[in-house]
Image (tube, grey):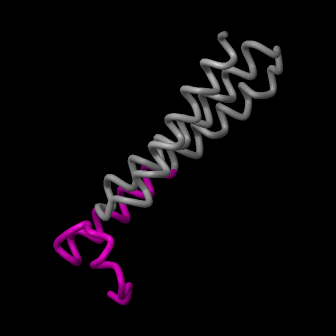
Amino acid sequence: MGMALAYTIGLLLFAIGALGVLVRKNAIVMFLCIELMLNGANVILMGISKFKGIVEAQVVVLFIMAIAAAEAAIGMAIITAFYRRRGGVEVDKAELMRW
């Protein structure tokens, strides 16, 4: 039961994130959906680590968390610069990326 629950929650988080990236046009919401997808992958990896005893999955989770932290810092800086330049964070405004 525990492994199936971890897979279900992880896949549900990943699917919600993927749907949000495909449907939404706000860059901040898309950014948060990408973070949700990363967390879904982390839940699945932690389930594998706990129920199958594969300790290396925890190391991969730590790498994913480090990448997500770096992505958050760089991504929010880019979104902030885009907002200051264009006056909004809608992806439709990014059709021409020349400053």
- 30 in relation to 11, above or below: below
The foreground one among 1 and 40 is 1
Q: Main secondary structure of the magenta part?
A: helix
- Left or right of 13 in this view: 91: left
Assess whether residue 83 is covered by the magenta stretch: yes
Q: Going 36% across and 84% down the picture, which residue do you hit? A: 95
The image quadrant of residue 75 is bottom left
The foreground one among 90 and 14 is 14
Q: Residue 98: x percent and y percent?
A: 37, 89
Q: Residue 4: x percent and y percent?
A: 66, 19
Q: Give the residues drawn in magenta, as a range.
A: 71-99
Q: Going 32% across and 71% down the picture, which residue do you hit? A: 91
- 77 in relation to 90, above or below: above
Assess whether residue 56 is covered by the magenta stretch: no
- Left or right of 5 in this view: 22: left
The foreground one among 41 and 8 is 8
Q: Residue 28: x percent and y percent?
A: 31, 55
Q: Residue 94: x percent and y percent?
A: 34, 79
